[in-house]
Image (cartoon, coloured by chain):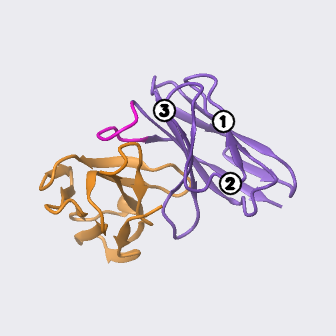
């Protein structure tokens, strides 16, 4: 079955450490996205990628970095520069960027900074 | 960036009751989508709307794309306990086809 897989499900990080969240899809989707979810707020876009080797900053990119070396993979690194990294992180993909293409979401990674 | 205004924030209803929630924006949207999120999981697409005035059903769920293209609503009829979760609206604005904006969600609790 095709889908989008995020790992790990739960992640604990010490302050000052970088951490990388994995996102893999086998849907042959061109576009991939990273969102951050905080309680009582809508999803906020961190980064997105429309094609391999290209990505764009979203609304809250500061303190995060991404890469898109393969179509299937879009890892997110939460750096020590991110002031408040504790959140639920969601990866999504769509067949194409643009209107009319709904997003398929992964099951999320809950990051806690201790 | 501009987010969507979704209401109500939360609802507590009795099993069997109907539910209505809506999403509004000050700007025009090309596409409206409704997602449901279970605790600790990613959102799952329920209904997608692509034309102003469009009314689409998915089982007990019905959603409409507002005629002004600035709003959408979702109705759930005869609610059941498994309807519990957070419902999000999302839309793609006309000024950026590559953008998707989300509402803050409506948290639904269904009492048996």
What residue did someone put label 2 on? A62
- Residue B8, picture quadrant: bottom left
Q: What element carries label 2?
A: loop
Q: Magenta stretch?
A: A96-103
How far apart are the two marked residues, 3 and 2, measured between alpha carbons? 20 Å
Quadrant placement of the C terminus of chain B: bottom left
SS class, disc 3: loop
Q: Position of residue A93 (x, y in %)?
A: 47, 36
C-alpha gap between disc 1 and disc 3: 14 Å
Q: Which of marks 1 and 2 is nearer the N terminus?
A: 2
- Main secondary-structure element of the magenta-colored stretch: loop
Residue A64 is tagged as none
Of marks 1 and 2, the one in the foreground = 2
B65 or B38: nearer the eye?
A: B65
Residue at point 55%, 50% (across, down): A58
Local crowd at mark 3 within 10 Å, few (<14), some, or many (≥20)? many
Pointer 1 chain? A
Answer left or right for A76 relative to B31.
right
In the depicted view, which residue is nearer to us: A25 or A46? A46
Residue visible at 68% across and 54% down in the picture = A62
Dots 1, 2 in contact, CB < 8 A = no
Marks 3/2 in contact by CB < 8 Å: the verdict is no
Q: How crowded is mark 1: few (under 14 residues within 10 Å), some or many (20 or more)?
A: many
**Percent coordinates x, y for residue A23 in the rendering:** 61, 35
- In the picture of the structure, the residue carrying the numbered disc 3 is A50
Asked if residue A15 lies left or right of residue B98, the reply is right
Q: Which of A18 and B84 is in front in this view?
A: A18
Return the residue found at the far front.
B95
Label 3 in the same subunit as label 2: yes
Q: Which chain is purple?
A: A
Check disc 1 and report the residue beneath it.
Answer: A75
């Amino acid at each position: 079955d095709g889908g989008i897989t995020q790992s790990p499900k739960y992640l604990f990080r010490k302050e000052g450490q970088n951490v990388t969240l994995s996102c893999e899809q086998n849907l042959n989707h061109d576009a991939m996205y990273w969102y951050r979810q905080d309680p009582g707020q809508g999803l906020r876009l961190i980064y997105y990628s429309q094609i391999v080797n290209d990505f764009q900053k979203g609304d809250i990119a500061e303190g995060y970095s991404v890469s898109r070396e393969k179509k299937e993979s879009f890892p997110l690194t939460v750096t020590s520069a991110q002031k408040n990294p504790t959140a639920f992180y969601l990866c999504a993909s769509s067949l194409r960027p643009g209107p009319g293409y709904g997003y398929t979401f992964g099951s999320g990674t809950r990051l806690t900074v201790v | 960036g501009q987010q969507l205004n979704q209401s109500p924030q939360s609802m507590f209803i009795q099993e069997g009751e109907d539910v209505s929630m809506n999403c509004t924006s000050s700007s025009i949207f090309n596409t409206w989508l409704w997602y449901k999120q279970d605790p600790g999981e990613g959102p799952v697409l329920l209904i997608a709307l692509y034309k102003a005035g469009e009314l689409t059903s998915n089982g007990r769920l019905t959603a409409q794309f507002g005629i002004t293209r600035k709003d959408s609503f979702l109705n759930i009829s005869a609610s059941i306990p498994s309807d519990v979760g957070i419902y999000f609206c999302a839309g793609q604005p006309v000024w950026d086809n590559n953008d998707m904006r989300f509402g803050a969600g409506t948290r639904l609790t269904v009492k048996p």
